[in-house]
Image (spheres, helix red, strand yellow):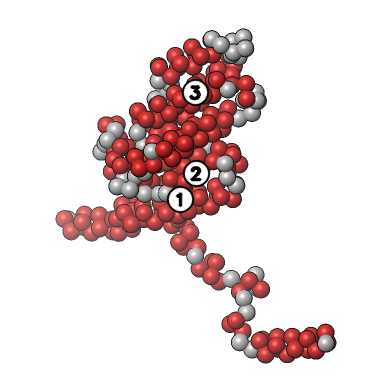
Amino acid sequence: MKLDPAIRDQVLATVPSLRAFAISLCGNIDRADDLVQETLLRALAHIDSFQPGTNMPAWLFTILRNLFRSEYRKRRREVEDPDGRYADTLKSHPEQTGRVEFEEFRTALAKLPSDQREALILVGASGFSYDDAAAICGCAVGTIKSRVNRARTRLADLLAIDSVDDFGPDRATRAVFAGGGRS
Amino acid sequence: MGEREKDDDMKHRQTKLEPVAEKPETENPMARPAATAHKPEARLGREVQARIGQQLRSMYNDVVSQGVPEHLADLVRRLSDQEQD
């Protein structure tokens, strides 16, 4: 029997966000696509363990995360990012160059511990509920909430350093003075 | 003996009442100037948080908008057309 086309379409519809999540974990598009491919192979081989009507994205994200974690344990050295290689990879995408503010953001994001970054992305970007994010990460809802909070606080701290000049009153004041000085 | 303990406890409490500063703030929910004192920071935080949310989604959606790469779409179609028992 062939796979129910409705289920297949649900899988296909999840691939784009699955890739975005994978990239946020790996920090590398090629490895992310390998990870997504592996996830799809695994998922379709075990599709009977998916209960129709339940959350397909959460199911696929869980598989992907588990695959990544087991690979991560094997290649810890390679994946860890003490020198901001994650940030560098993201910076190197041509469509993202020239966006200074964005790069600051990515650099700050790369400085977060991976469990905090993961929680923040699941909740803040993928749009999962705290409950779903907790299920995906295999931890308590409270743990996800505290990781997300710590991630947001840390990012705000990291970005605030730069943002004082970016959009604080100082810049406006200086602009006014600069303009006034000329006339 | 129980009486004496209670007495001691009362005495202890009475003497304790004098250094008011030692009372935990939480006893009086109205007396929480510390919480409201953080408000300006919290407001600044909200702006930053909104920006963080925006950039997070924008970064994520950059990838999402690339859609399904051909080789992954092929893989899913191939696997769902074969096998299954």
Residue at numbered disc 1: A151
Report, in whole angstroms, how far the alpha carbon at label 3 lies from the one at label 2. Answer: 22 Å
Most distant residue in the left direction: A182
Residue at numbered disc 2: A119
Residue A7 image offset from top left, x and y in percent = 59, 19
Q: Residues within 10 Å of mark 1 (few under 14, many from 20)?
A: many
Residue at numbered disc 3: A40
Q: Quadrant of the C terminus of chain B?
A: top right
Name the amino acid, label 1: Ala
Report the side of B53 relative to A62 (left or right): left
Residue B83 image offset from top left, x and y in percent = 56, 11
Q: Residues within 10 Å of mark 3 (few under 14, many from 20)?
A: many
Q: Residue at x 46, y 47 (%)?
A: A116
Q: Earlier in the sequence, mark 1 or mark 3?
A: 3
Query: Closest to the observer: B1 or A144?
Result: B1
Name the subunit of mark 1: A
Report, in whole angstroms, how far the alpha carbon at label 1 lies from the one at label 2. Answer: 8 Å
Do the CB atoms of the residues marked 1 and 2 lie less than 8 Å apart? Answer: yes
